[in-house]
Amino acid sequence: MTITPDHLLKLKEISGPKGWIDQPGSMEPFLIEPRDKYHGQTPLVLLPDTTEKVSEIITYCADHKIAVVPQGGNTGLVGGSIPTASGNEILLSLKRLNRVRATDAANQTMTVEAGCILSDIQNLARDSGFLFPLSLAAEGSCMIGGNLSTNAGGVNVLHYGNMRSLVLGLEVVLPSGDIWHGLSGLQKDNTGYDLKQLFIGAEGTLGVITAATLKLYPYPHERNTAFVAVPSPQAAVDLLSLARSISGNCITAFELMPRLGLEIVTRHMDGTRDPMASAYDWYVLLECTSSLSRDLLDLEKLMERILSQAMDQGLVLDGVIAKNEGESNNLWQLRENLSEAQRHEGGSIKHDISLPISAIPEFLIEAGKLVESLIPGARPVPFGHLGDGNLHYNISQPIAMDKQIFLDHWTELNRQVHDLVKDFDGSFSAEHGIGRLKTGDMISYKTDIELDLMRRIKHSLDPDSIMNPGVILT
């Protein structure tokens, strides 16, 4: 339905005096995706500050068949929180729903609203002696509602799991405007379908998450980080198995990085440097953590034992172990700055894929051959969360190639890489979601049964398709 001035007036009234923006300049930050691949239009940005107001807004939009695009911190990379260029959708920002409703220390849970910034939740948990383990590059601006809607992962998935594993209950405004009060703190509740899982990863297409009960963990006061050179990706996989066998459940992060990636970071990011005197083809950043005190578990000795055995087996060629938190943070900067640093190398064609860990070495060989055959001189920079099988298979343009000519290969290169991922029984989307960017991939790689089931669920909950239309499913 076309949005009329009367519709806008009513929606402003529902959201309240401070709950809306309609000036183009003020709305602009809500309408641009971080990589500038999507630029949307809307006549109105709504910023309600209570779940009840969200419910009233959605009820009104449902009655008048007005499309709604929910948005958290707008840090997503697939266009899932940006309205289309039609200007016929209302943008619903959750940033004013930012209260912490409860902390239950005995239950190890925290109930927060969707607009809470991830880093604020991490800090609040730490102040109470706990850890909320989700950690990713955008944690200073991304919001819990968006983390849930995209099933965010990050560097600690290996140990703690992604957002599906970190939440016990949800509060959701359904496409009808009804509120599902599902903020359970129960560890066990075997009473039928696990409804919260419908909305986690649904990117706002089935309803608006307004609050969540999150799991907390004992704070890991002991941390030991190492940055090591390995002879090959296969050695990195073998090192992961060895580290797990020695450390038990102490390995919380295990990141793979190529030499080119390290060079790009140290070339473009101030304050970073190569921690080793010699150059090697591949590197692993691994970290052990524990909530036990050092007199009960000495992580430094544990890491030394892992690396000593790995060197004896030829899995590690060289390495450094952080002596303190500052050195640990410096090592992490080498990994966390890679995406940003790659922008300085010109065009970059990106893939967010997951594979069986055992298949990663062979995939990297075959993918390298594929890229070279399609774009001679292109520079693959595969990096990421080897410990859980999630790679960011990014490709920087050839040094002598025009940026736009290189980016014109995006669609074809994506298709070829994703076809190869499928051959290895992997997924074309690991942690960034589908959004608007990958709806074509859904059709290409999901089975007819999977797509039909998703469409049935969508139609059952949102028969008029007012919730984030065009996202995930076309």
Image (spheres, grey):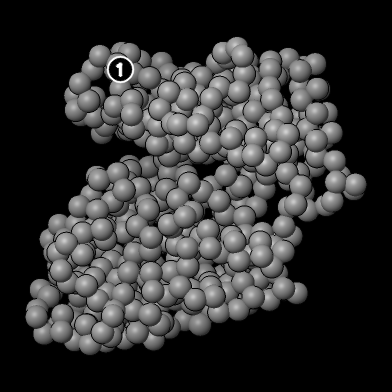
Q: Quadrant of the C terminus?
A: bottom left
Task: Locate residue 12 relative to residue 286 in the image: left or right.
Answer: left
Above-or-below relation of 274 to 145? above
**Residue 396 coordinates in the image, percent (x, y):** 34, 25
Above-or-below relation of 362 to 159? above
Question: Residue visible at 83% across and 28% down?
Answer: 305
Q: Which of 81/332 is in front?
A: 332
Question: Residue visible at 70% across and 33% down?
Answer: 322
Q: Which of 458/209 is in front?
A: 209
Circle 1: is it few (<14), some (14-19), or many (20+) Cα within 10 Å? some
Residue at which label 1 appears:
398
Q: Which of 34/54 is in front?
A: 34
Q: Quadrant of the N terminus?
A: bottom left
Task: Locate residue 464 relative to residue 124 in the image: left or right.
Answer: left
**Residue 16 coordinates in the image, percent (x, y):** 28, 85
Above-or-below relation of 61 to 359? below
**Quadrant position of residue 224:** top right
**Quadrant position of residue 288:** top right
**Residue 183 coordinates in the image, percent (x, y):** 56, 78
Question: Residue visible at 76% across and 18% down?
Answer: 311
**Quadrant position of residue 234:** top right
Above-or-below relation of 283 to 322? above
Task: Locate residue 119 relative to residue 56 in the image: left or right.
Answer: right
Question: Residue visible at 58% across and 35% down?
Answer: 330
* Viewer can see residue 234: no
Residue furthest to the right in view is: 295
Q: Secondary structure at mark 1?
A: loop
Type of residue at label 1? Pro
